[in-house]
Amino acid sequence: MAMDLNGITNQIIGAAIKVHKVLGPGLLESAYETCLNYELKEAGLAVERQKSQPIIYEGITIDCGYRMDLLVENLVVLELKAVERILPIHKAQLLSYLRLSSCKIGLLINFNTKYLKDGISRIANNF
């Protein structure tokens, strides 16, 4: 599974870099999300966009309006940003999605950087 996760995250990062090279920084998050969704599907990966993530509270499923930007292969959660800088709340948001979905790995990608490698954080869910 670890090799699969690493392979998938490598594919995601490669696709994100391609999108960033073509579009550059400065666009809305939705533009990057749409293009990355396209690239990942073209690579043959299963992708769900704006996937609803309910919470379970005392055995009851509650839809609070949480939505993951992209869920890849039902294993990797992507939280995309186009902001000046990543704040602790952005990492907390991704970690919450990981906990709620029971996924192990998430990528926080900020497209508003000169070099995309500077805008990528990999976050692990230790349950």
Image (cartoon, rainbow, N blue to C red):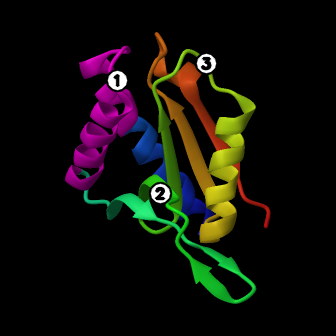
Q: CA distance from mark 1 to mark 3?
A: 16 Å
Q: Amino acid at mark 3?
A: Arg
Badge 2 vs badge 1, beta-carbon distance below 8 Å: no
- In the image, residue 60 sits, relative to residue 39, either above or below, namely below
Please name the residue shown 71% across and 53% down the image: 124
The stretch of residues the image draws in magenta is: 15-42
- Write down the quadrant of residue 61 in the picture: bottom right
Secondary structure under the numbered disc 2 in the rendered image: strand
Pinpoint residue 9: horizontal percent, then vertical percent.
50, 49
Task: Return the residue nearer the eye: 58 or 74.
Answer: 58
Residue on which disc 2 sits: 67
- In the image, residue 15 sits, relative to residue 72, either above or below, namely above
Q: Which mark is residue 39?
A: none
Q: Amino acid at mark 2?
A: Arg
Q: CA distance from mark 2 to mark 1?
A: 23 Å
Residue on which disc 1 sits: 20
Q: Is residue 126 visible?
A: yes
Task: Return the residue nearer the eye: 20 or 52.
Answer: 52
Please name the residue shown 70% across and 89% down the image: 59
Farthest top residue? Answer: 114
Q: Which mark is residue 85?
A: 3
Task: Return the residue nearer the eye: 63 or 76.
Answer: 63
Q: Earlier in the sequence, mark 2 or mark 1?
A: 1
Pinpoint residue 11: horizontal percent, then vertical percent.
40, 46
Nearer to us of marks 2 and 3 is 2
Label 2 packing within 10 angstroms: few (<14), some (14-19), many (20+): some
Q: Earlier in the sequence, mark 1 or mark 3?
A: 1
Per the image, is 35 magenta? yes
Q: CA distance from mark 2 to mark 3?
A: 21 Å
- Write down the quadrant of residue 48 in the picture: bottom left
